Image (cartoon, rainbow, N blue to C red):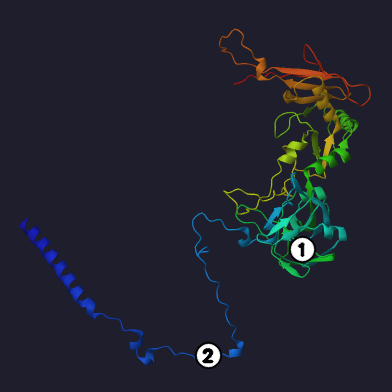
């Protein structure tokens, strides 16, 4: 034990002596100043003669006022006029005083999709702008924030490049083009002599279109593209014309010009039930064709049944609900958290996909069609005093007779004895039918039957 204590004391004395020696050496270690360095150790200095005529005087920086400090205080919102926006990122606003909801949609393809071939490196795509189109172009207000004012019937131009795999020998239909997302290859583009920046996708994003409206010219316009590497033969490029429309204009145009006669819908149903379709190799005979009557957004029966012109299904969705659910392309205006009096913005021009599951077609304002047959079914259900919100499906036979399947609401379940029902409750499904006149018209009466109609299977589902 005594030996261990002596070793510890010796180690402590040795550590203390080493610390004192280091403290004595520190004041003696002094680095020489730059002026004390020998001249032969300094790097040579080169004197540069400048011509006074070539010196450009630097403008002094603007003084910093107390109301504009170098570092903004916490919670300050930067105004959009100070953002590094591109042309297509600017805030798109309708004119002041517009009370209706505004929509953007692709009106037409100014140039048909041009295929980017593997053996071609330079492309030229010209197109014309008429006097009327030039007058209706979107104007940009640059007083403060850059705001693109888009009144009713205003026009925009943009260019997109898409990769289309299902083209027909280099020909792409308008329906397929509008349903395909943008995809840019290695390419350089100029428009009327001004170079364009390709807006490629970021992380978890997608390629975007290029705005041409502010560089548009009256008369001839020209797009020049140079391909850096050999692209896939499935790349196509086209110029789109986008129009801004009021809500009432779209609704009135659909009712006036795109109402499908009920006889046409009944003929389609008859052909499908009879197996007369040319693309069917095997025909299966069924007693009736079932059509869903519920809107995909509200889950109740539609008021105005519409679908896209390119859609092949017979199911429809409600016109007003579909328009009101179109997404608005919001760009910050700098009024977050405060009262904003900025005019509303129109909807995005790329949010017109058919809402029904399994359909990849476009149902834009210029493609919406009202189904006259389903519209009459809705009127007949209301005329008979039934509740349209519980009308779930429609069964149509080949001869034109149709039956509405109505589901009871929860009010029909009444436990009058007041005792607790230990058995699982069953859903009741009521059926109602209407027999049309001998003509293709379906004007008839909706009557309640005591039992299910013939050739209609009623399935009772037990609740878990």
Q: What is the x, y in percent for residue 296?
A: 71, 34
Query: In the visual, does 15 lie left or right of 184?
Result: left
| Label 1: element kind | loop
Q: Which mark, residue 48?
A: 2
Q: Nearer the viewer, mark 1 or mark 2?
A: 2
Which quadrant does the N terminus fall into?
A: bottom left
Q: Which mark, residue 167?
A: none
Earlier residue among tags 1 and 2: 2
Q: Up-down: is 404 above or below 177? A: above
Query: In the visual, does 218 lie left or right of 358?
Result: right
Q: Quadrant of residue 286?
A: top right
- Residue 217 or 2: which is nearer the viewer? 217
Q: What is the x, y in percent for residue 190?
A: 75, 67
Disc tally is: 2
Q: Quadrant of residue 391?
A: top right
Q: What is the x, y in percent for residue 232?
A: 74, 59
Q: What is the x, y in percent for residue 348?
A: 72, 49
- Residue 237 or 44: which is nearer the viewer? 44
- Residue 418 or 66: which is nearer the viewer? 66
Q: Up-down: is 10 above or below 464? A: below
Q: Up-down: is 25 above or below 373? A: below
Assess whether mark 2 and mark 1 are in contact (beta carbons under 8 angstroms): no
Q: Which residue is mark 1?
A: 118
Residue sitting farthest toward the front: 66
Residue sitting farthest toward the left: 2
| Label 2: element kind | loop
Judge whether residue 130 can be spotted in this image.
Answer: no
Disc 1 crowd rating (10 Å Cα; few below 14, some 14-19, many 20+) is some
């Amino acid at each position: 034990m005594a030996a261990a204590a002596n070793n510890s004391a010796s180690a402590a004395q040795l550590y203390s002596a080493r610390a004192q020696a280091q403290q004595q050496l520190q004041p003696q270690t002094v680095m020489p100043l730059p002026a004390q360095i020998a001249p032969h150790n300094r790097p040579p200095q080169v004197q540069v003669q400048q011509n006074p005529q070539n010196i450009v005087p630097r403008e002094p920086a603007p003084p910093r006022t107390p109301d504009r400090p170098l570092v903004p205080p916490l919670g300050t919102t930067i105004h959009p006029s100070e953002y590094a926006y591109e042309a297509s990122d600017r805030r798109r606003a309708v004119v002041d005083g517009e009370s209706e909801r505004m929509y953007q949609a692709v009106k037409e393809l100014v140039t048909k999709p041009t295929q980017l071939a593997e053996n071609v490196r330079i492309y030229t795509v010209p197109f014309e702008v008429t006097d009327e189109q030039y007058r209706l172009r979107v104007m940009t207000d640059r007083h403060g924030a850059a705001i693109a004012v888009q009144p009713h019937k205003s026009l925009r131009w943009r260019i997109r490049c898409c990769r289309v795999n299902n083209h027909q020998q280099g020909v792409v239909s308008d329906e397929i083009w509008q349903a395909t997302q943008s995809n840019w290859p290695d390419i350089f583009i100029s428009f009327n002599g001004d170079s364009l920046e390709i807006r490629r996708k970021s992380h978890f994003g997608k390629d975007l279109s290029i705005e041409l409206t502010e560089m548009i010219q009256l008369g001839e316009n020209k797009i020049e593209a140079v391909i850096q590497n050999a692209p896939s033969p499935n790349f196509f490029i086209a110029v789109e014309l986008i129009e801004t429309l009021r809500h009432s204009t779209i609704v009135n145009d659909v009712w006036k010009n795109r109402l499908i006669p009920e006889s046409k819908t009944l003929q389609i149903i008859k052909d499908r039930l009879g197996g007369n379709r040319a693309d069917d190799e095997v025909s299966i005979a069924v007693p009736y064709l079932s059509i869903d009557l519920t809107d995909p957004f509200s889950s109740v029966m539609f008021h105005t049944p519409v679908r896209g012109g390119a859609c092949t299904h017979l199911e429809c969705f409600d016109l007003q609900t579909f328009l009101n659910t179109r997404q608005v392309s919001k760009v910050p205006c700098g009024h977050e958290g405060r009262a904003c009096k900025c005019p509303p913005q129109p909807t995005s021009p790329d949010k017109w996909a058919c809402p029904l599951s399994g359909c990849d077609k476009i149902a834009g304002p210029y493609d919406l069609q009202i189904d006259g047959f389903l519209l009459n079914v809705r009127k007949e259900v209301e005329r008979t005093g039934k509740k349209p919100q519980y009308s779930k499906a429609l069964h149509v036979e080949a001869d034109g007779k149709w039956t509405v399947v109505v589901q009871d609401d929860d009010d029909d379940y009444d436990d009058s004895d007041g005792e607790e029902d230990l058995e699982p409750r069953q859903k009741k499904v009521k059926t109602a039918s209407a027999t049309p006149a001998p003509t293709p018209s379906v004007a008839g009466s909706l009557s309640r039957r005591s039992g299910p109609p013939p050739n209609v299977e009623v399935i009772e589902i037990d609740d878990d």
